[in-house]
Image (cartoon, rainbow, N blue to C red):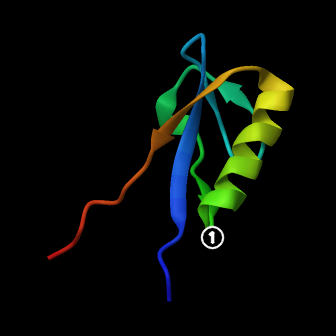
């Protein structure tokens, strides 16, 4: 099984877009994590959100590995 691509999206003004509600927030802790099965799907989500909110910055999201 391949690992999903996970990312958050930040607006140019520093606010964050949450998933799946499409809400804009100033609190990064409330920003949702987008998941995609491959880079093409991630790009499609990113461009769809840019069409709604304008220029976005991709912020990679990772979990800390457990021991």
Tell me where residue 21 appears, x and y as whole percent.
Answer: 78, 44
Residue sitting nearer the eye, 40 or 65: 40
Residue sitting nearer the eye, 16 or 4: 4
Residue that sits furthest to the front in the current view: 40
In the picture, the quarter occupied by the C terminus is bottom left
**Crowd around label 1: few <14 · some 14–19 · many ≥20 (10 Å):** few
Q: Is residue 60 visible?
A: yes
Residue that sits furthest to the top in the current view: 13
Above-or-below relation of 42 to 51: below
Residue under the point 70% across and 26% down: 24
Q: Is residue 22 visible?
A: no
Residue that sits furthest to the bottom in the current view: 1
Residue where numbered disc 1 is placed:
37
Q: What element carries label 1?
A: loop
Tell me where residue 33 appears, x and y as whole percent.
Answer: 57, 50
Left or right, 27 with reference to 47? left
Residue under the point 60% across and 59% down: 39
Left or right, 22 with reference to 35? right
Above-or-below relation of 9 to 11: below
Q: Quadrant of residue 13?
A: top right
């Amino acid at each position: 099984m391949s690992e999903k691509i996970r990312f958050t999206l930040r607006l140019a003004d520093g606010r964050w877009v949450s998933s799946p509600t499409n809400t804009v927030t100033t609190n990064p802790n409330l920003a949702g994590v987008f998941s995609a099965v491959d880079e093409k799907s991630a790009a499609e989500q990113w461009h769809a959100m840019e069409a709604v909110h304008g220029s976005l910055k991709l912020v990679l999201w990772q979990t800390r590995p457990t021991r």
